[in-house]
Image (cartoon, helix red, strand yellow):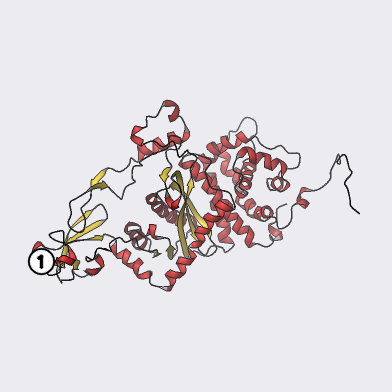
Amino acid sequence: MMGRRTRDQGKLFYEFWLEDRIPENHLLRRMNVFVTAALADLHKELEPFYSDIGRPSVDPELMIRMLLVGYCYGIRSERRLCQEVQLHLAYRWFCKLDLDDAIPHHSTFSANRLGRFRESDVLRYIFERVVWSAMAMGLVKGEGFAVDASVLEANASRYHGVPPDEIDWTDRQRQKRAVAEYLAAMEADPPAVTVHDAGNDDGGPEQPRRRQTDRKAPKVISPSDPASAWTAKANKRVQFGYGLNYLIDIEHAVIVDVEATPARTYDEVEATRTMIDRTERCFDLRPKRLAADTAYGIGRFLGWLVKEKRITPHIPVWDKSARDDGTFSRSDFRWDRRSGVYICPAGRPLRSTGTVHDGTTLRYRATLEDCRSCRLKEQCCPKAPLRYVSRDVDEDAREVARAKMKTKAFLRSRDERKRVEMRFAHLKTHHGFERLRLRGLSGARDEFLLAAIVQNLKTLALRLVKPPPDLAVA
Ligand code: SF4
């Protein structure tokens, strides 16, 4: 017989315990153990940023828990987050709210996020506490790290880019947080000046170009978020974006550091140095090997990794020296380590004056007499009187990386580094994180820290089938 619900009016009073309504294996319940540990000293940490007088504020722990719910379930609008927490029992339970407790107004979030939370750097504090938990649970081995960056679209219109020389900031624009932050950063660290390159390997004329060791000036900037970079990376449409940089421990893909940069390769490589140094300082972790893609295989970075940090690079070397016009490539010239010269295929030496060009390159030169009478000249430098060969000042480190590329360990690292790419994929597909909401580099930093906290918490939670009873929260 078909049943039919005939009740006109629901019960007026309900009696149940919220705790009973949340299943044992609910993600928030499993994450809660670690969130509670990470936020244990939150009030003490934030105390200096609150006044001793006045009305009690909204509990910062409540706001952080709500933000974690938002980043976990892809609810990044604060207005919507308040509505969802209002209605969802599990969200209420996770935020330690009773059924009739009031939800904070959404404007409270902006005031605190842009004020106290940023000043106190509380999100980084929480991130580090979560990594400490992962280390305590044995999820961080510290033997191998992988690094990569992904582009996230900035909260800026791609149709309103302006060349930086043409922009005349009005007083109103200067008062905006993202613009003020950008102008202050530009004042502290102006873009590179144009210098002269030392010419090409055929001895061609010197060409003016920007120094690669410095940050390049952007071609176009966004008036609403000028710190973001105009980019078409990763075969995406051209847009303004920020680079989300993750440094992960390969073993369980725990994110050990995160950094926000404009979406430019140069900044992303520089951010890796910051992350490796910070991880060592904060957690006393220095990996034996670092896996990364070719973008990180430049001499400057490899030199720093090998010589200063003593970390083995499992990184393909960025090498553009091979020629496809039938003339000799640099690999046809033998490096004589003892004499510090290149030996050409005709057996003649190429010497350097020791001048470092472009901050990174030494140029080795054959003599005019040798080349003029050489029988191999047509295969070597048909359009120039003599041959030049460039050598990176960190070529030794590049050689170390090149040698590693032929090993089985490198192939394993190449597979393992996909785990960092999976982190980005999960963030975009499972957490709906495709576009930033906050503006400015500090806005991107806040959002990336929250994303990394949530992803680490999820890793911790999913590795525990059941929270141990002694850690369960009352
Ligand atoms: S052209 Fe000059 S550099 Fe080239 S093989 Fe002959 S001698 Fe050596």
Total marks placed: 1
Q: Quadrant of ligand 1?
A: bottom left
Position of 36 with respect to 383 (left or right) is right
- Left or right, residue 379 beside residue 427: left
Magenta segment, which residues? 2-10
Whether residue 9 is in magenta: the answer is: yes
Q: Position of residue 353 (x, y in %)?
A: 16, 58
Q: Nearer the viewer, residue 266 or 100?
A: 266
Q: Quadrant of residue 100?
A: top right
Q: Position of residue 246 (x, y in %)?
A: 48, 54
Give the residue at x 50% y 40%.
Answer: 155
Q: Residue at x 40, y 38 (%)?
A: 221
Q: Specify whether residue 426 is in view.
A: yes
What amino acid type should be assigned to the residue bearing mark 1?
Asp
Specify whether 445 is left or right of 430: left
The residue sitting at 84% across, 43% down in the picture is: 14
Q: Quadrant of residue 280?
A: bottom left
Mark 1 within 8 Å of ligand 1, using the beta carbon: yes
Q: Mark 1 = which residue?
A: 370
Along the horizontal axis of the image, is 260 left or right of 377?
Answer: right
Label 1 CA crowd tier, 10 Å (few <14, some 14–19, many 20+) = some
